[in-house]
Image (cartoon, rainbow, N blue to C red):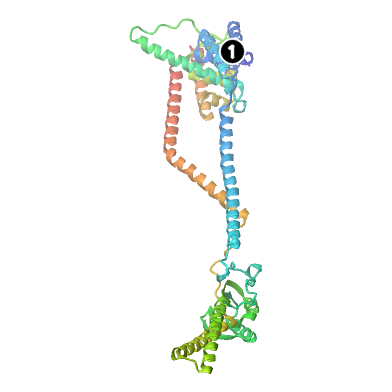
Amino acid sequence: MSKASFETVLRELRASAPPAPAQLRERVRGLPEPRVRAFGFNRRPALAAALAVGIAVAIGAAAIQGFQGSSDRRRDSLGAAAAQVRAPTPKGAPVSPSFKPAFGKRSDQGRPLLSPLIPGSRLQHYDVSMSARVEDLSSATKSAVRTTRRLDGYVSGADYSTGRSTGDSRLDLRVPVQHVQQAIARFSELGTILSQQIRVADLQRAVDGLDQRRLVARTVIAELEAKQRRGELTPAEQAELHGARRLVARLSRSRASLVSEGTYAKISLTLTTRKPAAKQTAPGRFDRFWSDAADILGKEAIIVLYALVVAGPFVLLTALVLLAEHARRRRADSRLLEEAA
Amino acid sequence: MAEEHLDDVYRYLLYVTGDPHLAEDLAAATFERALNRWRRFDPNRGSARTWLCQLARGTALDHFRAEQRRRRREDVYAAEAPTGDEASFGEGLSPALEAAVRSLSAAEREVVVLRVILELDGETTASVLGIRPSAVSTRLSRALQKLEERMVSDVQS
């Protein structure tokens, strides 16, 4: 059969294709109207919407948790700082303010803590311990010694050691109490303060106690010496007079020792050239927010992965079964149509 | 929609079944099914004609399956009953062409009606039949070849 005649056949097929009978047309027209469901929805958009809502909830939960987490931690840190400031100090108890600034450049955070070091009329013992990181250990050590001497102080001990790349120097210094503020201020200029601790012990009470006991003993001595001059001193009173004089002498030595202790402040200064192991910076609120949000998202991802790992084989198996069933059904349909007349 | 595509659905079912009465019944069933499922119709996935042809194919296959089961049941007791009326694939169709079309299987007639009479493109036909477009081309080619051979043999005889 030629191509032209075959085209004719195809045209004949098209032209003679019967229209639907009028009877069928009537039947179709008579079909009832489709029922309208009040809450009908399409599966695909509903699934897409459910997925979108799920993702939005997951991200929203992470954001809220991140926001709350960063606020809570900030509140905690502020509360802790406030509690430290408000912590009551018993009256007369030694004051021990400590200061440990973060590693880094010298800044406001690295300022020496001088406020408790305002020498008043009371006799007090100052014990200062501070450490600083310096660039040049030798010149910093010499500078510290010079400063101490300029302030009428002296070096009671020194330990200086240097290695190939790093070195440490420890100085035990005695500085007059009235110059302790200046000393700390100048030592803090040697480098970056790494830590600082100041202990203040009240000596006045002890000195007052000694003075009181000395006064009593001197009164006793004066009475006994008066008797001695009148020749009325008994041997027992003679012994009592010697004891009282020894007591006064001992009390005077103790008082002198306490006064000496209160005259010079003890400063332990450690200088080092060691670099900090790693720069530690407190994360900001934004960083904390992202960190907390990322944590939550990570946990959610783990849950989803866990669910996938657990349910994955079953889902895969079901999909394979469905695919096999679909293929089998398609083959069966083809066979059915092949066999149909 | 029903009025617009009724002829196409009927022609498809007529070619698949080869029986005008059965095609009429199945076309009515197809539209009934379409009205029940009209909410599932998604214009983004294909035209209404394609969707109706898919429904018509499903209806026809359901019928063939039911017939197959019925025949298996009845074969136990009696021989298969002869088919009733002689089918006609068109009023103006020549007897030779009518006979040639009749000699094709339902699967072959199905692809002929979709590609030649309803003039669907390869992609749409593949979507109706649930096969790849290349399989549609192959199947159509074989069907037309068979039709041609049958026509030639009829002319020669």
**Residue A142: x %, y % from top left:** 60, 85
**Residue A213: x %, y % from top left:** 53, 81
A323, above or below B1, in the image: below
Q: Residues within 10 Å of mark 1 (few under 14, many from 20)?
A: many
Q: Residue at x 62, y 80 (%)?
A: A177
A89, above or below A302, in the image: below
- Three-letter code, disc 1: Ala
Residue on which the image places disc 1:
A17
- Asked whether, in this view, residue B105 is left or right of residue A142, the answer is left
Q: Nearer the viewer, residue B127 or A60?
A: A60
Q: Nearer the viewer, residue B99 or A242?
A: A242
Q: Which quadrant would residue A107 be assigned to in this image? A: bottom right
Q: Nearer the viewer, residue B109 or A336?
A: A336
Mark yes or no: residue B148 visible: no
Q: Chain of mark 1?
A: A
Q: Residue at x 63, y 16 (%)?
A: B1
Q: Secondary structure at mark 1?
A: loop
Q: Is the N terminus of chain A in the top left, top right, bottom left or bottom right quadrant?
A: top right
**Residue B59: x %, y % from top left:** 50, 16
